[in-house]
Image (cartoon, grey):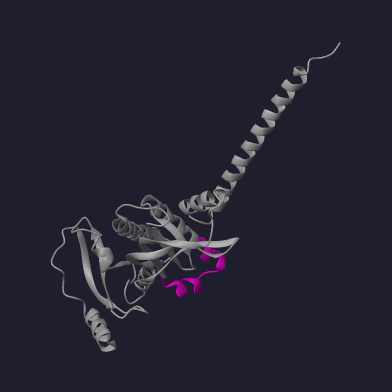
Amino acid sequence: MEVPSIAYVIPAVFWWVILLGYLLLEEQFAVARTRVTFGRFVTPSIARTIMDREEAGKLALGGEEKRVTVLFGDIRGFTTLSEGMGPSDLLHHLNRYFDGMVDIVNRYEGTVNKYNGDNIMVLWGAPLEVKDQARKAVECALEMQRWIVSERERGGPDVSFGFGINTGRVVAGFLGAKGRMEYTVIGDAANIASRLTSRDIARRDQVACSGETLGELGEDVETVDLGAILVKGRAEPVPCWQINRLGAIRSPRPAPAPDVAIRRAAVAGYH
């Protein structure tokens, strides 16, 4: 007796559907595993951007112009700290501080761009748009500052940071070679933020910002005039301020400290 062909077709279709479902699930699990693994090394927003562009076939070298706020945080006394403990203890303490700082960065919608030994670089406005980016960057720096002080007071190592913040236009995108690309920002705005972390500007437990950033903070900010700094490649000096707190009523700007007058004289002499 001849068996109807449908008796063979139905099981075949059933197992084909099962196999297809398994392959689709496996692909989704693979993508999820890659996101989790990759996210351990870069901030989640950058990981998502890279993965989404890779899946869409749009991951390529190049960039786009964006207005961003850049924060640099630099450890003060790192050499003394490293001389006083072994490499494993030093790495442990650095990771402990960076873990706490990254938690704060995430709460303020920042993107950790990179670590470089004893400093951290954070972005607002790239790769994702952020409202009130300058204010969030300053609020983030002030909270990190408070957290670092509290860790010291609880018996942690004598670690302190100086923070520099600037707002401006940069080129943001993927830099490197295929297979080994890094998301970064390039431009004068990033250079100024880095320069603001100099030990003669943002000192121990201080937050310094440029006029571009200060202009976006509103009136409820308490500042100290730090004078102007010279930045390589710029003809004009860059005014900068120390941020003490937000949520204050801005009072008349106090007279500059003596070292500010010396710095201004040096800038004037340079020109």
User: Residue shown at 66%/37% (left/top)?
Assistant: 23
Q: Residue furthest bottom?
A: 269
Highlighted range, magenta: 76-94
Please state which of residues 58 and 100 is positioned toward the viewer in this rendering.
58
> In the drawing, does residue 177 fall left or right of residue 107?
right
Q: Is residue 253 magenta?
A: no
- Judged from this view, the residue extending furthest toward the left is 252
* Residue 258 at x, y percent in the picture: 21, 80
Q: Position of residue 163 (x, y in %)?
A: 35, 66
Q: Residue at x 42, y 69 (%)?
A: 75
Q: Predominant secondary structure in magenta?
A: helix
Indicate the quadrant where residue 121 lies: bottom left
On the image, the x and y values in percent for residue 46 come to 48, 54
Report whether residue 97 is seen: no
Image height check: is 122 above or below 267?
above
Locate residue 270, reporting x and y percent.
29, 87
Residue closest to the eye, 96 or 172: 172
Residue for point 33% across, 78% down? 234
Residue farthest right in this picture: 1
Quadrant of the image occupied by residue 269: bottom left
- Foreground residue, 4 or 76? 4
